């Protein structure tokens, strides 16, 4: 669905775009692979109980035949491309390929049965019924899915919010092609171009909202899934500079093909843009099933850790209250996911000062502001335990780049290229930089650059196993650290 924008609309910073449940080609492919498995097993079971007998426990030969069809159908389907995003969302085009894959699978089963001289062990009626039922269920599920996705896309529930950088002929052709897609899952919410004054003010009926700086602000304040760079490919240096900046944003970045890609035949990639020729140059670190895995990891482990450390939380809170006056918890504004400011919780480790500090001063060795209890809980990282409530609440993760104070963020973002790439995921209680020794005071630019490098590596290489590895390392090396003051 293309979001037409009139010239009277508000400018970039005043526009708010709601997020839906963006469809992912990898997720859709995995779901349909699983569903086909269910339909094949169900088809075999139903036809067996009707034709062979009312017995849900299949004979070993029949069960082996069903498993053979499932494996063969899956691998032939992958080879034939029936699990690509564009084919799943085009059931009429998919019909001949589905028929060929299904027929080939059963022909291979018959050939195997004849070669092993076990064909007489199978009912011919069951074999034909099994094949027909499998084809019907698989095909019917794709038509139902197409109608369901079309309905949800029309309601704005299952859609991908897309912004485009570039307002030339490529963008005009791209908008025309996206406008013809069915179902309309790509919602163009903004077009940007650095050549303000030389292009526009509109392209394809869409208002040009500003330059690349406006694009950066727009993505940070709205839910954007994909950024498409629609610029001539011969502008190499400009492309490199643009992609380097866009790498800091939590969105997929694609380079759409130069005009030649629209004029000559090409082999489209299996992505959610259907037949539009483009390549992905920046991948969003957490998308598809990864978002669910990361969320479950944080909620489940975070809740368990709160229960485990409940006695410790209580003892530390009592010790802080007994030693000095003031609140038990220290709260501070920090930058989190996508540069959004949130409030972080820590146990108060310093003497309470009623005056609010405008400039954040990092704790240093022998700092007179730190209490005796505070010195202990900082060295043992017990002051970080209240952040488990941040994790369960959704503003932080167990593992991720450590969040910095707002003024430190603004200072170092001017000095370190790609600094904000660490904000493509939620900040964490512990992280790859911390277990590699970059914990505590960062009193030099080199130390902060080292921390940012490790954070960026984590963001670009996230996996559940990587998180578990960091948590295990934290348990052994992360609690007590000589650099924590």
Image (spheres, rainbow, N blue to C red):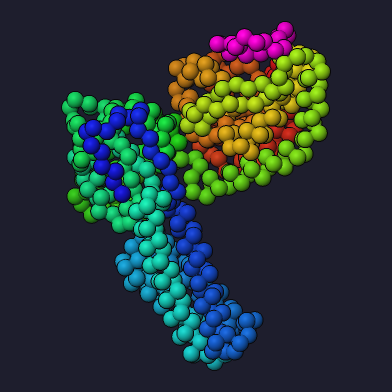
Asked whether residue 360 is drawn in magenta, I would say yes
Give the prevailing secondary structure in the magenta stretch: loop
**Could you tell me how many numbered marks the image carries?**
0
Residue found 34% across the figure and 25% down from its top = 213
Q: Nearer the viewer, residue 476 or 159?
A: 159
Give the quadrant of residue 369: top right
Q: Nearer the viewer, residue 311 or 84?
A: 311
Q: Position of residue 329 (x, y in %)?
A: 69, 23
Residue found 56% across the figure and 11% down from its top = 359
The quarter of the image holding the C terminus is top right
- Would residue 139 be visible to someone looking at this image? yes
Residue found 78% across the figure and 20% down from its top = 320
Q: Residue furthest top?
A: 368
Residue found 58% across the figure and 26% down from its top = 343
In this view, 173 is above or below 444: below
Asked whether residue 190 is drawn in magenta, I would say no
Q: Position of residue 318 (x, y in %)?
A: 81, 24
- Would residue 281 be visible to someone looking at this image? no
In this view, 382 is above or below 366: below
Q: Position of residue 124 (x, y in %)?
A: 49, 90
In this view, 219 is above or below 258: above
Q: Write the start and end of the magenta stretch as one range.
A: 351-369
Please state if 452 lies on the left or on the right of 481 as rendered: left
Give the quadrant of residue 231: top left
Q: Nearer the viewer, residue 19 or 368?
A: 19
Give the quadrant of residue 391: top right
Q: Position of residue 26 (x, y in %)?
A: 46, 53
């Amino acid at each position: 669905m293309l979001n037409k924008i009139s010239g009277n609309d508000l400018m970039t910073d005043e526009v708010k775009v709601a997020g839906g449940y963006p469809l992912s080609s990898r997720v859709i492919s995995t779901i349909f692979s699983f569903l086909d498995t269910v339909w094949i097993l169900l088809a075999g079971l139903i036809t067996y109980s009707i034709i062979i007998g009312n017995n849900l426990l299949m004979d070993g030969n029949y069960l082996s035949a069903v498993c053979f069809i499932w494996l063969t159908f899956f691998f032939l389907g992958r080879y034939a491309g029936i699990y690509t995003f564009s084919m799943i969302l085009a059931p009429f085009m998919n019909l001949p390929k589905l028929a060929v894959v299904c027929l080939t699978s059963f022909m291979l089963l018959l050939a195997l049965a004849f070669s092993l001289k076990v064909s007489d062990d199978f009912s011919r009626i069951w074999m034909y019924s099994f094949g027909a039922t499998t084809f019907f269920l698989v095909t019917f599920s794709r038509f139902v899915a197409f109608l369901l996705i079309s309905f949800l896309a029309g309601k704005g529930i299952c859609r991908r919010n897309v912004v485009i950088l570039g307002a030339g002929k490529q963008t005009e052709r791209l908008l025309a092609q996206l406008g013809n897609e069915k179902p309309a899952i790509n919602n163009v919410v903004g077009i940007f171009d650095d050549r303000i004054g030389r292009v526009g003010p509109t392209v394809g009926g869409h208002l040009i909202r500003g330059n690349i700086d406006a694009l950066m602000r727009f993505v940070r304040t709205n839910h954007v899934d994909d950024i498409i760079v629609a610029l001539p490919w011969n502008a190499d240096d400009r492309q490199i500079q643009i992609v380097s900046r866009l790498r800091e944003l939590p969105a997929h970045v694609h380079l759409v093909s130069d005009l030649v890609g629209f004029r000559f035949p090409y082999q489209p990639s299996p992505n959610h843009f259907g037949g539009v020729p483009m390549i992905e140059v920046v991948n969003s670190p957490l998308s598809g099933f990864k978002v669910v895995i990361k969320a479950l990891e944080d909620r489940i482990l975070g809740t368990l850790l709160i229960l485990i450390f409940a006695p410790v939380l209580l003892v530390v809170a009592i010790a802080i209250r007994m030693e000095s006056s003031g609140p038990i918890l220290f709260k501070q504004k920090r930058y989190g996911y996508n540069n959004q400011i949130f409030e972080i919780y820590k146990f108060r480790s310093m003497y309470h000062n009623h005056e609010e500090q405008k400039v954040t001063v990092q704790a240093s060795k022998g700092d007179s502001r730190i209490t005796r209890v505070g010195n202990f809980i900082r060295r043992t990282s017990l002051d970080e335990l209240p952040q488990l409530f941040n994790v369960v609440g959704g503003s932080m993760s167990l593992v991720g780049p450590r969040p910095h104070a707002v003024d430190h963020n603004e200072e170092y973002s001017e000095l370190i290229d790609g600094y904000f790439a660490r904000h493509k995921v939620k900040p964490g209680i512990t992280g790859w930089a911390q277990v590699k020794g970059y914990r505590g005071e960062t009193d030099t630019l080199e130390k902060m650059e080292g921390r940012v490098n490790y954070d960026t590596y984590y963001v670009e290489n996230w996996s559940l196993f990587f998180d578990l590895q960091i948590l295990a390392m934290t348990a052994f090396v992360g609690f007590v650290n000589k650099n924590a003051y």
